[in-house]
Amino acid sequence: MTGAPGSAPPQAAAAGQARAGPIRLCANADARSVRQVLGLVTHRVSGRLSHGAAEIAQMVIAEVLNNIVEHAYHGRGGPVVLRIRQHGGVLVVSIADRGAPLPDSLLGPQGAPMARLAEGGFGWPIIHHFARRMSYRRIGCWNRLRFCLPLEAAVS
């Protein structure tokens, strides 16, 4: 996962958006941009989420974005569009990219068996564990992943 030389930093769709409003970020799929996007998301959702829920949101979004960098674009970079909005007691997260399609084996409720996942494969089970109402669609050349994250972290 190396950043593309000269890749543009993530851009907010509308400058001056209120912190409580929807978030829309467009970025290149590279390691540096993922870190920048996570910083922007953390800043924008602070105050909306409990501390635990904010950490979970950051972890899940990081796993999804890192998977896009590594597996959808194979480290070559490409566009990623992240949208986050609050609806009731959840954050609705939508992520779109133009990389390789998500394999069918990862779409089930538990994802692929651990033995079949690359590099230890802990990212996808983490995503499935915390994300709710996950859906994936391939529309033309775009992958569209959508899921919900609770505003409060569940105490177990």
Image (cartoon, rainbow, N blue to C red):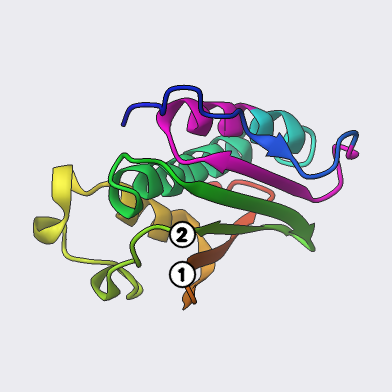
Q: Percent from the top left, x then y, of residue 58?
A: 54, 38
State which tag comes first along the sequence, 2 or 1: 2
In the rendered image of this protein, does residue 107 appear above or below residue 42? below
Q: Would you say 75 lies left or right of 12 here?
A: left
Q: Percent from the top left, x then y, of residue 30?
A: 43, 34
Q: Secondary structure at mark 1?
A: loop
Q: The N terminus lies in which quarter of the figure?
A: top left
**Residue that appears at 11% across and 60% down:** 116
**Is any atom of residue 154 visible in this view?**
no
What residue occupies the far left of the structure in this picture?
115
Q: Would you say 135 lies left or right of 119 here?
A: right
Q: Percent from the top left, x then y, of residue 74?
A: 28, 46
Quarter of the rendering containing residue 70: top left
Q: Percent from the top left, x then y, of residue 81?
A: 60, 51
- The residue that label 1 is drawn on is 141
- The residue that label 2 is drawn on is 98
Q: Would you say 36 lies left or right of 100 here?
A: right
- Cα separation between marks 2 and 1: 6 Å
Query: Mark 2: which amino acid?
Result: Arg
Query: Mark 1: which amino acid?
Result: Cys
Q: Would you say 29 lies left or right of 102 here?
A: right
**Disc 1 packing (10 Å; few <14; some 14–19; many ≥20):** few
The boundaries of the magenta stretch are: 17-39
